[in-house]
Image: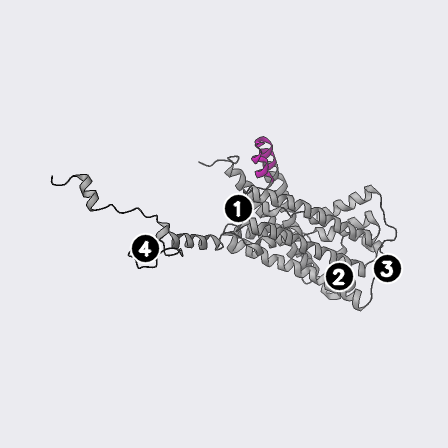
Amino acid sequence: MLFEEDSLTSIIPPPSPTPLLECSGHRPSCSTAPSSRTDTPIPILINNQQQQNKPSPSKMGYFGATSYVIGNIIGSGIFIAPSTIIRHTESAGLSLLVWVIGALIAFLGSLCYIELGTSIREAGCDFAYICYVKWYSIAFSFMWVSVLMTYPATIAVISETFGQYLLEGLRQTYVIDPKLAPIAQKCFGITLLWLITWMNFFALGKFAARFQIAATFAKLLACSIIILTGFYYYFVLGWNEGLKEPMANSKWNAGDLTMGICGGLYAYSGWDILNYGTDEIDRPRRNAPLALLSGISIVFLAYFCINIAYFAVLDVETMKSSNAVAALFSQKTLGGFSEAIPFLIGILLIGSLNSNLFCGSRYMYAAAKQGKNLKIN
């Protein structure tokens, strides 16, 4: 050979290695000279970020999550709890204070569950958190008691109650045979249950979450009718039946206050629904806390205004005498429109049924992920 390797190196120097990022045209320090090489990594990263920021159609966003919180809290509690609380407080002012305390306790509980839900991003709520600390036997028992007893019983009660109120509304127009009434009541409830179950088979963001938004809007509309009617009688007509002496005859003993607060907590129960499906929320670290706090705030405002409307029209003794406070209120203020109250309560129950199905099904899903569910080969 005429030349050895060292001599070739001295004549033709090897190309100096250039880092990939330094030659990219996206950095200001790089040369702007034209080059035949194309830099594909950065556009790919930008596209990936755009895809991550784009909401998934199979997940629910902020409004869908907020609607589940509101829909799961507002239910029969606002029609039952006022009379329970007033029996233990004996005054309108102390009763309203109990509603504020119940909201504060719900807020504190929601802050704890926000931390759990954003730190342990798994579906199943309490079941997932018990599994996280490896108490599998307790989690297994907790899950199966909820799936086999708690949620089926709750869903059955809501479904049959829906059939009962729908039947009561139809009786105002149609003559229904008393012998067929129990069968019709169960048929209405079973039909609603099957329809909502079928709807939850599809993508959450497309069907179930949108339906829950509509049901929640209907719930807030029903509450708005009571609020606006009561405020009209209070501010325009000057009615203040239960607000003349708001703190008169108040019971301040610990036992009655505790029982009153328990009644308020019953009305606020259900705010932990988002933790049952944390991994089905789009951007959970942002949307879950906002939806939970927004939902509880809206519910508290609605509950507080509804109770003021009740006290503007009804006195304390009347509210203590019956659990059907909304019916007494509508009969005294709405006249013929009071016949629509059974249908409005039925609408409230539809949203509650959908949210309970969401919770119960996510328990089964979380158990399957942990290997604690039945296996089908």
Range of the magenta residues? 126-143
Label 1 vs label 4, nearer the camera: 4
Question: What residue is disc 3 on?
Answer: 244
User: Within the magenta stretch, is there residue 142?
Assistant: yes
Instruction: State the quadrant of the C terminus.
Output: top left
Q: Position of residue 222 (x, y in %)?
A: 68, 60
Question: What residue is disc 1 on?
Answer: 279
Marks 1 and 3, Cα distance to the nearest angstrom? 50 Å
Marks 2 and 4, Cα distance to the nearest angstrom? 72 Å
Marks 1 and 4, Cα distance to the nearest angstrom? 38 Å
Graded by Cα atoms within 10 Å as few (under 14), some (14 to 19) or many (20 or more), the crowding at tag 1 reads: some
Amino acid at pointer 1: Asp
Q: Residue at horizontal 18%, vertical 41%?
A: 7
Question: What residue is disc 4 on?
Answer: 38
Graded by Cα atoms within 10 Å as few (under 14), some (14 to 19) or many (20 or more), the crowding at tag 4 reads: few
- Could you say whether the residue bearing mark 3 is in a helix, strand or loop? loop
Graded by Cα atoms within 10 Å as few (under 14), some (14 to 19) or many (20 or more), the crowding at tag 3 reads: few
